[in-house]
Image (tube, helix red, strand yellow):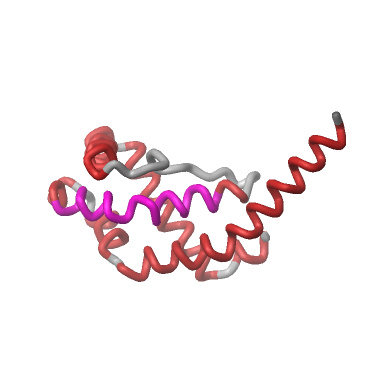
Amino acid sequence: MKDVCKHTFVADTVQKVGVIHQYFTMSHASCQFLKDAIKILQIKGGELKSHTKTRWSTMWDCINSIVRLEFTFARVLLEHGNDIKNRVKDILYNRNFYENCRIITFILHPLKVIVGCLESSSVLQTI
């Protein structure tokens, strides 16, 4: 898994995901814009998810939340584009960014499922 995360394609996309996550969690106004759009669009699964470097399986959750919220980001940009920083807008307007996120989640999902099964199995064995 570490090899996958070191690939330039993945590392660049994860870095951009981090920029988006940090911006929408640190900026009170932007965070509220996102929450409002999630509610209006009735997006299931909640808000942006974070990832932990020591728990690589959380990377899938984080990147998948970007994919799930694609239309939400579009609404935020449409309604509040002037209030969003250019660096963030550049990422969110880039169609390749979302496609790259989809590709990474497609690659990571089977690994996440397998690791989850193995962790569940090892927990059951210790009981």
x then y, percent, for residue 95: 31, 68
x then y, percent, for residue 59: 55, 51
x then y, percent, for residue 74: 23, 55
* Apparent side of residue 20 relative to residue 124 in the rendered image (left or right): left
* Apparent side of residue 93 relative to residue 114 in the rendered image (left or right): left
Residue nearest the observer in this picture, 80 or 38: 38
Residue plotted at (16% across, 46% down): 83
Residue nearest the observer in this picture, 109 or 21: 109
Let me know if residue 9 is in the magenta part: no
Residue plotted at (65% across, 45% down): 54
x then y, percent, for residue 87: 28, 57
Rendered view: 83 above or below 10: above
Rendered view: 13 above or below 64: below
Rendered view: 121 above or below 63: above
Residue plotted at (64% across, 45% down): 55
How would you classify the magenta stretch by its main secondary structure? helix
**Number of residue marks:** 0
Q: Which region of the structure is painted magenta? A: 59-78
Please identify the quarter of the rendering in which residue 7 is found: bottom right
Q: Check the image and name the residue furthest to the top.
A: 127
Rendered-image quadrant of the N terminus: bottom right
Rendered-image quadrant of the C terminus: top right
Let me know if residue 75 is in the magenta part: yes
